[in-house]
Image: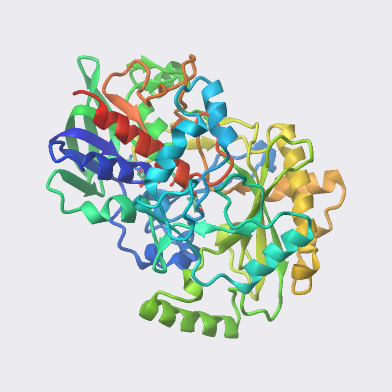
Amino acid sequence: MEFDFVIVGGGSAGCVLAGRLSEDPALQVALLEAGPPDTSALIHCPAGIALMARTDTVTQSLSTVPQPGLLGRRGFQPRGRTLGGSSSTNAMAYIRGQAADYDTWVQMGCPGWSWDEVLPSFLKAEHNERIHNAWHGQNGPLNVTDLQSPNVFSQRFVEAGVQAGLVHTTDFNGPTQEGVGLYQVTQRGGERFSAAKAYLTPHLGRPNLHVMTGVTVDRMGLVDGVARQVHAWRDGQALTLSARREIILSAGAFQSPAILMRSGIGPAAHLQSLGIGVLRDLPGVGENLHDHPDAVLVADAPGHTDLIGLSPRGVWHTLQALWAWRQHRKGRLTTNFAEAGAFYKSRPDAAQPDIQLHFVVAKLVDHGRQLTLGHGYSLHVCLLQPDSRGRVQLADRDPHSAPLIDPQFLSDPRDVQRLRDGVRQAQRILAQPALAAYGKEWAASADARSDEQLEHWLRQNTDTVYHPVGTCRMGQDKMAVVDAKLRVHGVPGLRVVDASVMPRIVSGNTNAPTIMIAERAADWIRGSRP
Ligand SMILES: Cc1cc2nc3c(=O)[nH]c(=O)nc-3n(C[C@H](O)[C@H](O)[C@H](O)COP(=O)(O)OP(=O)(O)OC[C@H]3O[C@@H](n4cnc5c(N)ncnc54)[C@H](O)[C@@H]3O)c2cc1C
């Protein structure tokens, strides 16, 4: 049970690291994943995402603590818990964010992370089926493609966006992000293309790659001040693994800080309150949690069975689609639901687009956990650069306990104001003829006209769009957890490589940026001397 590298968490980042590090046959690499292998058909059939939030086979359904900014509600925080992690359960939209996001990281004390420096790693990761230009990669493992069978309503949404004054774009990852269009997705041949499919599955036969599922990591142990041991549980049995060179934490924005804290690395007072001995007082561990706050507008479109919904004809269409997908990997079950979107400025004087839309070809209520009859469509409106900041803490010392997740959604009044402005523009899009001819926005949001009414609706309805980051943030100041090479401050032999290291959230979905982060880390690690 001794390896050169022990990687904790087989998610977006962990799969990249395992695949890249094991390219060198001289390195023994272990990947530990708490969840099962990624064999569920719900993962591979893109539309399976609709059922994943309802079953906990490959998803861990976490909740936030009550959020004062959301009238005391608890938010829902699902995370992928299988090989591929959240890339096996996400909505597959391929977005990198804006150049300015990464340039800001440099200003925040993270040299080497400017847009010009990160772009080569995005290109290295990517194989874009359609777009062949300097902005896209061709030879990477991660397949990026257009949707096979986009819904007619997604096209109508794009048309409505143009009618509302947005520019039509065929590439949100080109020179400008602003505009309205269909998303490109991480799929291939009508199947989801997770980080596991891209970086792990093809290499499972490598003799130096040891993938262990069903292993829940509890904590790490230091030998002579260096991170060397990983203590874990599998089927009720304790397990200890050793790392000759490095332990790499890739357990995601909630669990990486939790594992650090259980290991005695974190805010001293919090650790002491739980009886955990402090090995390294790092006050920033678990702090700086932020996420894209998001509210969903829903519209009824009765009788429009092109949209996925519950009706006798809708069920019949879905059964036919199931057959088409099983036989040919084609048809409406290749949908990622959030097929189209837009990026725009909440107000004209904003420096960058600060609102993102995801147009969903079904009625989406409570993350899909609440069934609604009939057909309709939905529009996620999310704020890309929130100012609210929260934290993750341990509830207790048990590695199987959920952490206390407190994103402090809408605690900063600026977030409310910008999201409100963003929602008003989204409502204008829904009201354009290309869409309004078919559907009607639900009264709860449509009738919220004054600032106060809309703010109240937002506080009743806002939640996550599933992009928590920042809890082991990069930097050089006292609250930073890792340095710009992702090494944990003051703990040799230990890195964190996942979405938790982002000092500030990117302006878009977080899977591709997390994969980029892991590609860079793998390059550095392989280039460094033992
Ligand atoms: C429902 C949903 C929809 C999303 N939609 C999109 C989208 O359309 N586009 C996009 O770009 N992004 C999307 N995202 C976000 C994106 O998928 C994540 O930001 C990204 O996958 C995070 O990668 P990660 O490596 O940080 O963590 P994860 O991929 O979550 O991986 C962490 C892994 O660590 C494992 N783990 C945790 N604790 C332990 C432990 N103690 N021991 C062992 N293993 C452990 C977990 O089981 C998991 O497999 C979505 C996310 C979700 C949940």
Number of numbered discs on residues: 0
Residue at x 63% of width, y 67% of height:
154
From this viewpoint, which residue is outermost toward the right?
450
Q: Quadrant of the N terminus?
A: top left
Q: Is residue 213 visible?
A: yes
Instruction: Say which quarter of the image contains residue 58.
Output: bottom left
**Where is residue 70 shown, x and y percent of the image?**
68, 42
Q: Using the image, determine if residue 332 lies above or below residue 339.
A: below
- From the viewer's side, name the closer residue of 141 and 310: 141
**Where is residue 295 shown, x and y percent of the image?**
67, 51
Residue at x 67% of width, y 37% of height:
68
Determine whether, in the image, residue 472 is placed left or right of residue 27. Answer: right
- From the viewer's side, name the closer residue of 408 and 337: 337
**Where is residue 334 shown, x and y percent of the image?**
47, 69
From this viewpoint, which residue is outermost toward the front?
133
Residue at x 34% of width, y 52% of height:
141
Instruction: Say which quarter of the image contains residue 88.
Output: bottom left
Q: Using the image, determine if residue 448 lies above or below residue 188.
A: above
